[in-house]
Image (cartoon, rainbow, N blue to C red):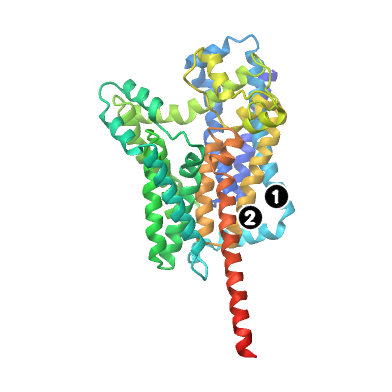
Amino acid sequence: MILAGTYVLAALAIYGATLYLGYRLRPYLTASSMLLAFLLLIHGPAYLVYMLFRGPQSVIYRRIAQSLNFDGIVVSLNLSIALMFIGVITGIELVDRFAPSSVRALHTAIFDWDSRPLSAGQSRPWWLLVLILGLALFMIGVSMIEHHLAVLAGYLAVGGKEVDKIVYRQQYGGSHLYVYRVLVNSIAPMLIVWGALAGWTRRWWPLLAVTALLLVATVLGKLETLSKAPIALLLIQLMLVGYLIFRNSITWRAALVAIGVALLVFYPIIRIAVPEAHGLEALSFFYYRAFDISNEAVLEFFGAYPERLPHTLGSNIHLLARILGTEYAPSFDIVSRVWRGTGGSTTTAMFIADAWADFAYAGVIVFSIAAGVICRAIDLTFLARGKTVIAVAVLAAAFMGIYNLMISALPTAMLSGGLVIAPLMAVFVILTQRKAQHSAARRAAGEASPGEA
């Protein structure tokens, strides 16, 4: 009875979040609406379908179902899914209550978005040009030091079975430099969009040239991971930018086109990864990887904590583990060992899975509210200023940050995923540019004063 009640509660939370998205946030592209849309898409009805129908067909599900307290695991997961949607909405509403004037400005900006031209400011963004050039040179330098072109050539030269490529990818794919990975994943794509739109709008060719150089360096960095998903996600991110240049409102036609575009992007990747999958089989595999695997990963975390392992109380978060003086124990590695019994693989899940591993229900509630607060703060900080190149660039970065929330912990999405670090970089560039302009204006006024006298 309790188990059935928690399923009903989770379904009601999903239904309520759907109504909130449609009637409160409205069909517009904002960071907060993308957050709720992602959660509803992957962990909404698809979660219920997996738990009630598709899950029992999975080996991992059946392994977890053998736990003595499986009903208790599912109860905790259902309650956490409900708390997640409630927490995200609470976070959004908290920000709106503290900044009502910014909310009104945001509503005006997105309502007028389609009819307004893209704005790039009155002056040339010299600091943006310098930053993009420096970043491109740094990334190219890292690629040369780490021999990324040689790694790619070696991967293309690998013959035989797919397993040989997997082994090669595990050994050589991806940079070992954390800062470089953050730049490739979050900062560089935002600056590419910002630089390209600002350079094109103002017809400033030097900015376009250095932005093209950064694009080349970024594509090389994504290819060097030897994974197909980063390039596919970059393409989708750039398509989102193309849509935002003209429109912000979402219609049913636009939604269907977006689904079609996503399938067109990922279908060739699926065919390469699984050559025997054709037509509906490829679409079924896409559903399995996008929805079943995502929800199964969350179930793995809830099945491991606290049924088999005690909650980590912060040792799962690298920075917090250092502050507390405890040994860093990443849950993505521990959970994989629990259910697969071997090393060499990891299990990553959306942000509330790690929150549960650390702090149980308290973690789910706090991290969900924090996610809502962060995304709504991005909206009020950037989109409320209107249809600007900065708003489009930051929203594109938020898209990747929110995607990372679906596959990793909140701290990881904030830093490596760019959910927080990319908007902070945008604020830094804006403030630096304004400071430089004010300094130039004061110098000009100081030089003019003696002549006037």
User: As rendered, which of 414 and 361 lies closer to the eye?
Assistant: 414
Task: Choose top left, top right, bottom left or bottom right for residue 330.
Answer: top right
Mark 2 touches mark 1? (CB < 8 Å): yes
How many numbered dots are placed on residues in this image?
2
Relative to 390, does residue 217 appear above or below in the rendering?
A: above
Which residue corresponds to mark 1? 95
Look at the image and tell me in which quarter the N terminus lies: top right
Residue kind at label 1, given as amino acid type: Val
Q: Is residue 232 visible?
A: no
User: As rendered, which of 18 and 403 lies closer to the eye?
Assistant: 403
Q: Is residue 302 left or right of residue 225?
A: right
Tell me which label, 2 or 1, sits earlier in the chain: 1
Badge 1, how many Cα within 10 Å: few under 14, some, many 20+?
Answer: some
Q: Position of residue 278 (x, y in %)?
A: 30, 28
- SS category of the residue bearing label 1: helix
Which residue sits at x=64%, y=8%? 68
Q: Position of residue 213 (x, y in %)?
A: 37, 53
Q: Where is residue 326 in the image (x, y as percent from the top left)?
A: 68, 24
Badge 2, how many Cα within 10 Å: few under 14, some, many 20+?
Answer: many
Task: Choose top left, top right, bottom left or bottom right for residue 171.
Answer: top left
Which residue corresponds to mark 2? 380
Which residue sits at x=47%, y=41%? 180
Residue kind at label 2, given as amino acid type: Leu
Which residue sits at x=49%, y=21%? 54
Q: Where is residue 96 in the image (x, y as percent from the top left)?
A: 70, 52
Q: Residue furthest right?
A: 98
Label of residue 7 in the image = none
Distance between the Cα atoms at labels 2 and 1? Answer: 9 Å
Look at the image and tell me in which quarter the C terminus lies: bottom right
- SS category of the residue bearing label 2: helix
Relative to 68, does residue 249 appear above or below in the rendering?
A: below
